[in-house]
Amino acid sequence: MHNTLVKFLNQQNLGLFIIRVALAAVFITAGWMKLASMDQVIGMFAMIGLTPFFAWLVALVELVGGVSLLLGIFTRYAGIAIAVIMVFAIVLVKGKMGFMAYQSDLVILAAALGIALLGPGRWSLSSGTGVCACCDKCKDGTCNSSSQ
């Protein structure tokens, strides 16, 4: 029973896929909503001292980064970009309100950094490249491991 449970739970690719899809849902929705109401978003950014450029940048990074995570392409870059946005959201907006205000942002930040560090996993559009990005069992950059 124990071995069966361990084997069932040892699903790195499924875990990465679930995290990617959840993050994608959050950021595609957030980016789309920001783009749909840019006048309000620009106003909110102005209240914290940021120019319209940053409002557009954040909205586009959220939308494009979310799509990237969903498809599993450029996921490391998307993870880094989303993590940067979350750091600024915590520091500039929610950090002043206390931990309860930014605890979910902290979880999103951790998940984005995890994706940036681990990559998309096998269940992604980029997995067909054959280039291993997650283990040291490969020769000449070609994946020879079934664990990717």
Image (cartoon, rainbow, N blue to C red):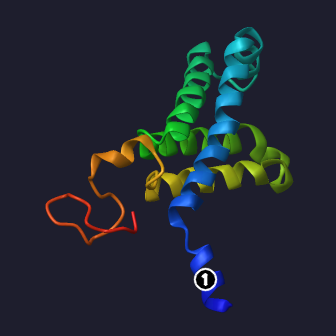
Along the horizontal axis of the image, is 84 left or right of 136? Answer: right
* Amino acid type at mark 1: Val
Give the image quarter of residue 31.
top right
Residue 95: give x, y in percent of width and height.
Answer: 75, 47
- Residue at the extreme top of the image, as rendered: 39
Residue pictured at 55% horizontal, 22% vertical: 57
How many marks the image carries: the answer is 1
Residue pictured at 75% horizontal, 37% vertical: 93
- Front-most of 14 and 78? 14
Instruction: Name above or below for residue 145 compared with residue 58.
Output: below
Image quadrant occupied by the N terminus: bottom right
Give the image quarter of residue 126.
top left
User: Counting other residues with Cα less than 10 Å from the Cα at mark 1, is it few (<14), some (14-19), or many (20 or more)?
Assistant: few
- Front-most of 54 and 125? 125
Q: Which residue is mark 1?
A: 6
Residue 103: give x, y in percent of width and height.
Answer: 78, 54
- Residue at the extreme bottom of the image, as rendered: 2
- Front-most of 89 and 33? 33
Residue pictured at 68% horizontal, 37% vertical: 25
Along the horizontal axis of the image, is 83 left or right of 140? Answer: right
Image quadrant occupied by the C terminus: bottom left
Residue pictured at 41% horizontal, 39% vertical: 74
Residue 107: give x, y in percent of width and height.
Answer: 69, 55
- Front-most of 29 and 140? 140
Instruction: Name above or below for residue 11 compared with residue 129.
Output: below
Give the image quarter of residue 14.
bottom right
SS at circle 1: helix
